[in-house]
Image (tube, helix red, strand yellow):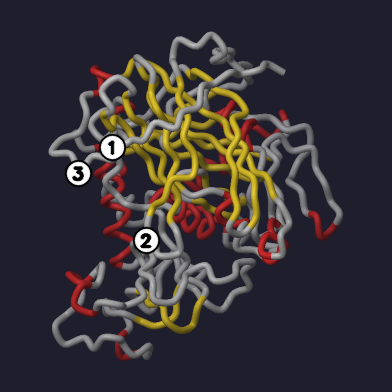
Amino acid sequence: MKKLFVSFTLVLVFIQPALAGQPEFDSYFTSGSLRVDLYHTGYEDTEYFSIDEIIKEPHWGGNHNALVDTMNLGEYIFRVFDLKTNSLIFSRGYCSIFGEWITTDEAIKGTVGTFHESLIMPFPKRAVQIRIDRRDRENIFANTFDFVVDPDDYHITTESRYGYFRTRTLIKNGPTSSKVDIVILGDGYCVDEMHKFRKDAKKLINELFSVEPFKSRRGDFNVRLIESVSAQSGVDDPRERDYRNNLLGLSFNIFNIDRYMISTANKVIRDIASKVPYDQVILLANEGKYGGGGIFNLYSAAISDNEYSKYVFVHEFGHAFGGLADEYYSSEVAYNDMYPRGVEPWEPNITALLKKDNIKWGSFIGANVPIPTPDDSTYTGITGCFEGAGYSAEGLFRSSRDCIMFSKSIKKGFCPACREALARMIDFRTKQ
């Protein structure tokens, strides 16, 4: 294994106020992307980062005119400062598997967990300071880790991995810098099942673009797939003691929830995805069992052959792309106190209703709709504030009685709050 030497600093960086305009891409960045692979370790209120590897990749799929994140989404945010001028030149909000881990029973009892994750940004022209902040229980960002990267450091890896996998384009609408670029990776598909992977991916991506706002905004997306080959069909199902040699490491029963299917093999996923420019990763499991998962600005994971496959594909993409919260409250989850009482969630589609005159989706609520809104058939199809959301029957509210983020159906589509949030994200990723 290569050793990587990175300089650490205690230099204090003063965060700039909201910029009048975005940084000029060509002033600070060149072609390709910088990927920082991290180990994220800890339990409950204790966490540590350590650097695994820093990599220069050939592509960066982002919008050159939206370098600084203005969305205010995610449990974490990483900010990048030009070391010479102390200017904020890039930022992205995101969530992580570790962020979910620390709310589980094991983490609260003191069991230490370690998860791999990556920070990805356009490749800088000169040295940068990268700062990772995490929201506290009041949703205020506080610094957790700082380090400096010099792009001329010869320890930065440039090797190509998994170069033998074939890539295909399903939808192409224009340059990567002005489109949302999706890449779909298959897991549990053997070499003689690539035809099935292509068919499954086309079927499910077409379902995504049958739902608003994606239906109207299809022209803002490019979609590619990478034919990632596994040695065995299917993915791990630990409760059945069924373990498969699947390349991307997707597994059911994450955090002891049988239907929760994600992967902790981040490094493999990123190495494969780097073959193409991308904003969003979708992992597609060659599976008939119900399950899936989606983590904001990490990836979404769905199954191919279940009666609810189309719903899972769209629902989990809502989490990963738009930072949407689950609106249901009756299903089993692994989390404890995910949303502290008296704190407004950062997710755009649920609210603690702390300020009735300043509801996130207030512009969609009619003047005669009561707040809170009674959860009865009288208000079906009406935008309001219905109690029960975010895994809690009380204290959290959603905008509609039903939504893709609430029940296992896509027929009624996304609720108004979700549609607006997804449209805003599309705008951020594409507007020039």
Q: On the rendered image, what quadrant is the C terminus found in?
A: top left
420 w.r.t. 408: above or below: above
Quarter where residue 430 is shown: top left
Quarter where residue 362 is shown: bottom left
Is residue 75 shown left or right of residue 381?
right
Q: Residue 312 at x, y = what percent?
A: 54, 58
Q: Residues within 10 Å of mark 3 (few under 14, many from 20)?
A: few
Residue hosting label 3: 18
Q: Which of marks 3 and 2 is in front?
A: 3
103 w.r.t. 213: above or below: below
Q: What residue type is labelled 1?
A: Val
Residue hosting label 1: 68
Q: What residue type is labelled 3?
A: Ala
Q: Residues within 10 Å of mark 2 (few under 14, many from 20)?
A: some
Q: On the rendered image, what quadrant is the N terminus found in?
A: top right
Q: Residue 244 at x, y = what percent?
A: 80, 42
Q: Residues within 10 Å of mark 1 (few under 14, many from 20)?
A: many
Q: Which of marks 3 and 1 is in front?
A: 3
Quarter where residue 157 is shown: top right
Give the residue at x 27% y 59%: 420
Q: Residue 372 at x, y = what percent?
A: 30, 86
Mark sitting on residue 346: 2
